[in-house]
Image (cartoon, rainbow, N blue to C red):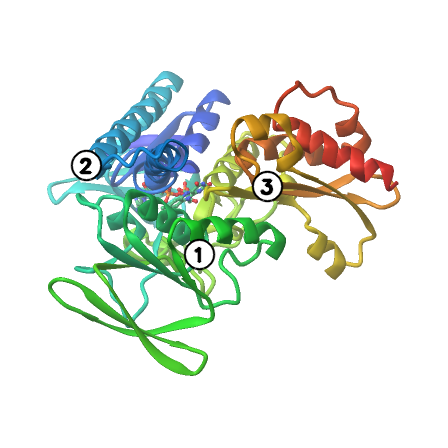
Amino acid sequence: MNSLEAVDTLVIGSGPGGYVAALRSSQLGMTTVLVERHQIGGVCTHVGCIPSKALIAEAERIHLRRHWYAVDEASSFQEAQLFKQAVVDKQSGGVRFLLKSAGVTLIEGEASLIDANTVEIHHNEQNERRIGFKHLILATGSRPIEISALPFGGRILSSTEALSLADIPKSLVVVGGGYIGVELGQMFARFGTTVTILEGGEQILPGFEAELVAPVVRQLKKDGITILTEAKVTGADPYTSHIDLQYMRQDQHHVVQAEYALITVGRKPNTDGTLGLEKIGLSPTPQGLIEIDKQCRTSIPNIYAIGDIVQGPALAHKASYEAKIAAEAIAGKPSVIDYKALPLVVFSHPEITSVGLSETDCKHKSIPVILGKSIFSINGRALALKETEGLVKIVAHAASGLVLGAQIVGAEASTLISELSLAIEMGATVEDIAMTIHPHPTLGEIVMEAAEQAQRRL
Ligand code: FAD
């Protein structure tokens, strides 16, 4: 067993939380070690954001050729998989390069806590070492939640296996109409799979307002997807060639048959197992989350937690944001978390995104608001791109015009939302956006027009 002098910061997990925390810690002049048990870049790079967006982009290209140019070429899923893997490898290599350039020491192995200043790292049976640390950032991420009646394996897939299928399935039933289920369901449909989405709630993409979800539902239906809401899965019979999935809907028992079932009902924090939180007296909540203060500090003053293992939506950019706060807090800076400008994105086609407060949130909080709305179908650039389905909605304070939130459904919503995040972060008003010169012809003008409309209501 080797031992090292106590490092300033030790980070466990190299996802978008952990690697960003390690980079920031090192940039701030602290000796930094990053421990990863599996793949550099975490879920995001290997089985999450990056591979899903690579396959979605390929599916979108197929859709465009088929829809606009009637080119129905046999789409090679194997080629798409090779493209996806090349993107993932490049991204993971990029993370490694950044860590090396910043002087972060990377150790491959599984970290278990010994006490509040020491971890033991197991690389394999023969190779283990202890490292002392002054500060620890836990960034161990999450894994897919299993439904007890439908354990993963064989014909029952989590998003991880679904993203690595060698061949395109003929049929797929997606259990859970949240963002991962909708994104992957639409992606498979565009590669030619017959897709059914079963969602327990009243609408898919719960949490987004109905007027934003409606254009996505229309497109999913055009893509041939069957959406069954208020459908509760009760069991499954997997066979060699297919799976029968039983569900209850409108008090009736039903069965849907498919080649595979994809379960996307949420993610579980990696705060159990051999990590050893109990050895340092850190007890996760019943959901497995670790409680933190405004600087990502746990109840143990030198131990921080970020990303999917703490409260809030499980998103890569939230993890990276918290990473910077935690590293800066360790360096003695007064940085604190403020989620008011945290965007949520669904990479469906059309994309949906939301930042800050919605009209519904403001109603619940009795905040008087003005709204500004503008649609894609009257925007020249949207017409030229043949992307006329969509809407920008800005929610502003009724008296001051301060931007409180915004929602977009439409092409490039994931990019357009950053202007509105910045507006919230900077305390901008609708007048500030309306009077900002936006280049013509761009989709950004739809944001400007929504702001102008809200401004007229002030
Ligand atoms: P992770 O990325 O989960 O990384 C944690 C790392 O810690 C892992 O590599 C793990 O091996 C390592 N680890 C755990 N325990 C130990 C240990 N004891 N010792 C050493 N290493 C350990 N988010 C978005 O913002 N946008 C998207 O488009 C998006 N798409 C997604 C699509 C899919 C299919 C999935 C599954 C997720 C998606 N997400 C997306 C969510 C995003 O991937 C996560 O929110 C993000 O990866 C969380 O980052 P993290 O740093 O907390 O943890």
The percent position of residue 328, horizontal first and vertical second, equals 55, 31
Whether label 3 lies within 8 Å of ligand 1 gets the answer: no
Q: Amino acid at mark 2?
A: Gln
Pick whichever of labels 1 and 3 is earlier in the sequence.
Answer: 1
- Front-most of 75 and 229? 75
Image depth: mark 1 or mark 2 in front: 2
Q: How many marks?
A: 3
- Front-most of 98 and 229? 229
Q: Amino acid at mark 3?
A: Gly
Q: Which mark is residue 390?
A: 3
Residue 110 sits in quarter:
top left
Q: Which residue matches tag 1?
A: 282
C-alpha span from label 2 to label 3: 32 Å
Q: Which mark is residue 78?
A: 2
In the image, residue 260 sits, relative to residue 139, either above or below, namely: below
Q: In the orientation shown, which residue stands out farthest toward the front?
A: 70
Q: Quadrant of ligand 1?
A: top left
The percent position of residue 26, horizontal first and vertical second, equals 44, 23
